[in-house]
Image (spheres, grey):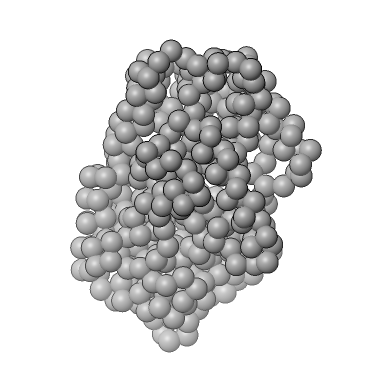
């Protein structure tokens, strides 16, 4: 999205927490403004400091358009915009992108039930009053926001964050008697890491020649994170390997014949699944919002109920034993990505929003 804005002649400032990729961001020609915050935790005082820092940034940059990406930046950024331009004539146009509603609306523990009404109220007050456009990645999230009181006329569906189809090319089905299955994600319980391991364990006990590759980092900012010790314990089991963070995910799909994501929470549209489909890998995923956008049953993969390890194992077994079906589903997945999820499609749809907002009037500062 930032590249598309730059190439369209806009000046782009990227504001984000910076850990390891500052040089890459600057090489793209973007101004970089580091923010010292975390996705999770810190308490109310840390939140107040973050909002104040974003407000200072907005006052200095005086942007025409602010694009907030993901739930916490949406909530903090919209509050910061009101703080930065209090008493002024409106401030910049606001685009809010929700990359899924996350575990706040799908978790079933007691704390989640207590937080949910507050989060719903925060979204209604933020998106209902501050946003000019709200981008969602799947229809279910759009329906949920409309149910919270967000004006449906300002909700825009843009499926995914865009895939570079030149970088992610179809790969041949890996050879060998053992079929590898890969789960690419953060190593958190909500992504179904333990369910995937249980399904592979069940199949190997029945003599099915399958292995599981877990590719992704731990996530200390997430309450459901699996720690290094827990992942090492999984990797000590026969047929399970934890690769850790992988810089080029094509290396994973060069080894694995099937993509799996037994996610149990509110996905937007998982980029890992789009990357797998672009590499012509069939997918087994849970029937939850986001996953079902890219997994078309019988066309690009198989959907199974969340938390159903037996159904997950049977779906993996069916694909593991049928190379021709894997190729058919993989080819259809690649065609779907080219048609609906390529970065050119997402860039064009995002730029249309920017142009519409700029055309509506002068910058509202």
Residue at left offset 30%, top offset 72%: 319
Above or below for 224 versus 352: below
Q: Left or right? Give the position of 116 relative to 353.
A: right
Residue 262 place in picture, x, y as percent = 46, 66
Give the vertical position of 204 relative to 52 (above or below).
Answer: below
The residue at the far right in this view is 45
Q: Is residue 256 left or right of residue 71?
A: left
On the image, the x and y values in percent for residue 312 come to 42, 74
Q: Looking at the image, is 53 positioned above or below residue 295?
A: above
Q: Where is residue 327 drawn, in percent x and y? A: 23, 62
Position of 335 with respect to 32 (left or right) is: left
| Closer to the camera in the image, 173 or 127 | 127
Q: Quadrant of residue 186?
A: bottom right
Q: Is residue 26 visible?
A: no
Which residue is found at the position 62% from the left and 55% from the top? Answer: 117
Q: Quadrant of the N terminus?
A: top left
Say which quarter of the image contains residue 347: top left
Residue, x 67% and y 20% (percent of image)? 56
Residue at horizontal 67 percent and vertical 60 percent from the top:
114
Quadrant containing the C terminus is top right
Residue 103 shows in this picture: yes
Residue found at the very far bottom of the displayed protein: 206
How many labels, in total?
A: 0
Nearer to us in this view, 71 or 11: 71
Residue 50 x/y as whole percent: 70, 32
Question: Is 77 placed above or below 106 here?
Answer: above
Q: Nearer the viewer, residue 125 or 356?
A: 125
221 horizontally vs 134: left or right: right
């Amino acid at each position: 999205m930032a590249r598309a804005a730059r190439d369209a002649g806009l000046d782009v400032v990227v504001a984000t927490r910076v850990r390891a990729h500052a040089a890459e961001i600057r090489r793209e020609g973007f101004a970089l403004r580091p923010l010292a915050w975390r996705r999770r935790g810190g308490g109310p005082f840390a939140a107040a400091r973050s909002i104040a820092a974003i407000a200072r940034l907005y006052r200095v940059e005086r942007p025409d358009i602010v694009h907030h990406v993901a739930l916490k930046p949406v909530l903090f950024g919209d509050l910061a915009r009101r703080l930065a331009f209090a008493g002024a004539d409106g401030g910049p146009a606001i685009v809010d992108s929700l990359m899924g509603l996350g575990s706040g609306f799908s978790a079933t523990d007691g704390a989640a039930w207590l937080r949910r009404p507050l989060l719903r109220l925060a979204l209604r007050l933020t998106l209902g009053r501050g946003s000019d456009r709200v981008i969602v990645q799947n229809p279910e999230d759009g329906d949920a926001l409309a149910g919270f009181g967000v004006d449906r006329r300002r909700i825009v569906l843009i499926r995914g964050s865009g895939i570079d189809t030149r970088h992610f090319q179809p790969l041949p089905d890996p050879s060998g008697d053992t079929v590898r299955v890969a789960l690419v994600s953060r190593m958190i319980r909500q992504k179904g890491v333990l369910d995937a391991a249980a399904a592979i364990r069940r199949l190997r006990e029945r003599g099915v020649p399958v292995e599981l590759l877990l590719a992704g980092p731990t996530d200390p900012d997430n309450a459901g994170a699996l720690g290094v010790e827990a992942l090492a314990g999984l990797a000590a089991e026969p047929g399970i390997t934890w690769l850790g963070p992988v810089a080029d995910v094509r290396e994973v799909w060069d080894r694995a014949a099937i993509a799996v994501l037994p996610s149990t929470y509110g996905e937007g549209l998982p980029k890992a699944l789009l990357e797998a489909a672009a590499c012509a890998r069939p997918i087994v995923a849970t029937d939850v919002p986001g996953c079902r956008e890219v997994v078309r049953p019988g066309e690009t993969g198989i959907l199974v109920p969340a938390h159903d390890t037996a159904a997950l194992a049977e779906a993996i077994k069916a694909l593991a034993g049928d190379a021709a079906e894997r190729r058919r589903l993989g080819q259809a997945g690649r065609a779907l990505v080219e048609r609906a999820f390529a970065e050119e499609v997402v860039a064009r749809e995002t730029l249309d929003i920017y142009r519409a907002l700029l055309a509506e009037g002068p910058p509202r500062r």
